[in-house]
Amino acid sequence: MTQRPPPDGSPPGGRNHGPVPVVLLGLGLAVLVASGWAALTGAASLAALGLPDSGAVTQYGLPIARTVAEVAAVLTAGSLLLAAFFVPPQQTGYLDVTGYRAVHTASYTAAVWAVASMLMVPLSVADAVGRPVDEVLSLVRLYALVPVLPGAQAWTLTAAVALIVFAGCRLVLSWGWTVVLFGAAVFGLLPVAVTGHSAAGGAHDQATDSLLVHTVAAALWVGGLVAVLSLAGRRAEPAGPLPTAVQRFSRLALVCWVAMAVSGVINAAVRIGLTDLFTTSYGGLVLAKSGALAGLGVIGYWQRRRSVAAVAAGQPGSLLRLGAVEVVVMLGTIGLAMALSRTAPPATGGPLPSRTEVLIGYDLDGAPTALRLLFDGRFDLIFGTLALLLAGLYLVGVRRLRLRGDQWPVGRTAAWLTGCVALLLATSSGIGRYAPAMFSVHMAQHMLLSMLVPILLVLGAPMTLALRALPATGRGAAPGPREWLLAAVHSKAARVLSHPLVTLPLFVGSYYALYFSGLFAAGVDAHWAHLLMSTHFIVIGFLFFWPLIGIDPAPRRLQPVVRLGVVFLSLPFHAFFGVILMSSASVIGRDFYAALGLPWVPDLLADQRLGGGLAWASGELPLLIVLIALVVQWSRIDERTARRADRRADADGDAELNAYNTMLRRLAVSDRNDRE
């Protein structure tokens, strides 16, 4: 006799606890690796990192607390990933039972993440100052020390984000807010990743970028797998969201594995030589982590071959077995990563890095000539890779349309690819290389990223292409990328962010807020701040120009005269910003630029005034492009209106024109009668 499954969806024979035992086993392994490494290396590893011995509580408590925090963060991101993108919401927009259960699980893991992160604040302070943790457990001392210690600042921000995610998970019921919480959870992974020895010394720009990619990819891979296993443990029948979730996770896992492999190789190459892999403890940890990653790739390959089809047939057993092994190994690698963070990279034996290399991560060969600005590049792992991916995905979409016989305007393709090239030049050519060291070059990069790149990308109509190229999932199926894009375009957030009263202050106001409030001076020496600024420039520029000259669907359609008015209204604010920079008597970020001491920049104020001149002059060409685009679009609207009128006239025999002429004749007759 077949036993009916319980109402909660768990398999027959009792409630299934999913991957909880496996997660606890993996967490125990990670803690054992991290604390065991701390016991083996002892104070020697701290001395190699330049840290004094802060006592046994910090020595063992810090790696344990950090491991728990990172595992909890990964599980939080994975649960929200499942609720947001792997299982369908209800037609009303609210989460269904499966999605709500995943968000509820994320609330518990976020609580653990927040508590462990808060513990990391005094532990990281004690570790940095070399005092026992009980001596810094004072609000007065923490208030004085946390603002000057980057590691403690990062954990404070992480704890705040984790608390926000926890509170949101207890309140959220809709799919849209679940996506927002997922984004917040991913952001919470970043503050700690941009601190530590990857953010200092030579090549710290590439080390930080690769670590960011590595961290996010690992979190989505590990957390997503645990969430999918939890779903598989509860629902073993072929009907339901499990097959879709497994298929989507399988694709995501492959992307994450490739991203982790490439970023891991880059990060290791920056920190360690080939021979040091086999002769140092740091190299041994790198090899152990690389071996675990390779093994996970093999297991993942077999899982995709066996489990996806088996789950579709209602047999998730192989997924649960292989996935359990993957989870244990994955969480164990978090312990290896913890051990790596507490181990100093081996000395290269070469000359000491120059002052320029210490401050920006690399040396500069001389003054920025035209040839150097074009060809003396340094590939940006974040934005350079983004430019290549955007160009490749766009061409794939165009090719998909062409294969089914649809046409796509060549002008849009040219605009998009030119925008990708502009993004690549702004971040990975000599412009990107010199931008962190010279205010004038930074301002040129700013203008490219906030003005030219967004204009070209908007004219490429990427959302229209995606909506035409991506397949619809069909009635009753789980929403896919096409439905997510439509939901984003028609969301309340998009409607607010695309309003001219919002985009105009954000676009022109960010210039003044960034450079004249002290924000730029506070972050000019940090690579993560440059990443944040570049992201801000691109996003705000896209939001500003999207409703003005965009071909894509937008939450609100502005009349051409309104678009033209917004463009002309932004002109004086933009020009005035450049004038202020050119006439300023104080140097923004003086301490950092003076510490660099570049011989070809003897006058920092003159370099800043040059940047102001570039800001004043370079904004004219992009705005000219905007005006041309507006005029062309306006004329096309008139042409379409005229064609519609002609078609209507052909269909009804000029009924509207005849009625208008009849009305005029009646008025003329009435006027003549009145005169008579």
Image: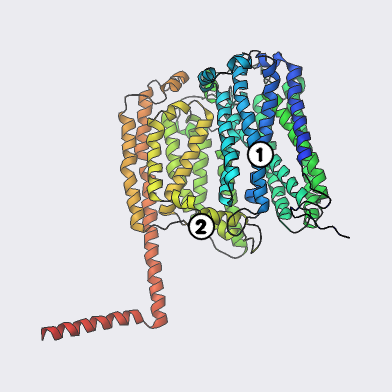
Q: Quadrant of residue 67?
A: top right
Residue 563 image point, x, y percent: 36, 54
Image quadrant containing the C terminus: bottom left
Image quadrant containing the N terminus: bottom right
Q: Residue 14 or 637: which is nearer the viewer?
A: 14
Q: Secondary structure at mark 1?
A: helix
Q: Is residue 635 left or right of residue 370?
A: left
When the figure is inspected, residue 226 is found, relative to residue 332, above or below; the finding is: below
Residue 600 image point, x, y percent: 43, 22
Residue type at tag 2? Val
Q: Residue 165 or 613: which is nearer the viewer?
A: 165
Q: Are marks 1 and 2 in contact (CB under 8 Å)?
A: no
Residue type at tag 1? Tyr
Q: Residue at x 42, y 25 (%)?
A: 589
Which residue is outermost to the left? 676
Q: Is residue 483 left or right of residue 299?
A: left
Q: Residue at x 31, y 82 (%)?
A: 658
Q: How many marks?
A: 2
To which residue does mark 2 refer? 410
Viewer can see residue 361? no
- How packed is label 2: few (under 14 Cα within 10 Å), some, or many (20 or more)? few
To which residue does mark 1 refer? 108
When the figure is inspected, residue 59 is found, relative to residue 224, above or below; the finding is: above
Q: Secondary structure at mark 2?
A: helix
Q: CA distance from mark 1 to mark 2?
A: 51 Å
Q: Residue at x 34, y 79 (%)?
A: 656
Residue 222 image point, x, y percent: 71, 40
Residue 213 image point, x, y percent: 62, 36
Nearer the camera: disc 1 or disc 2? 1
Q: Residue at x 31, y 24 (%)?
A: 585
Q: Is residue 311 left or right of residue 76?
A: right
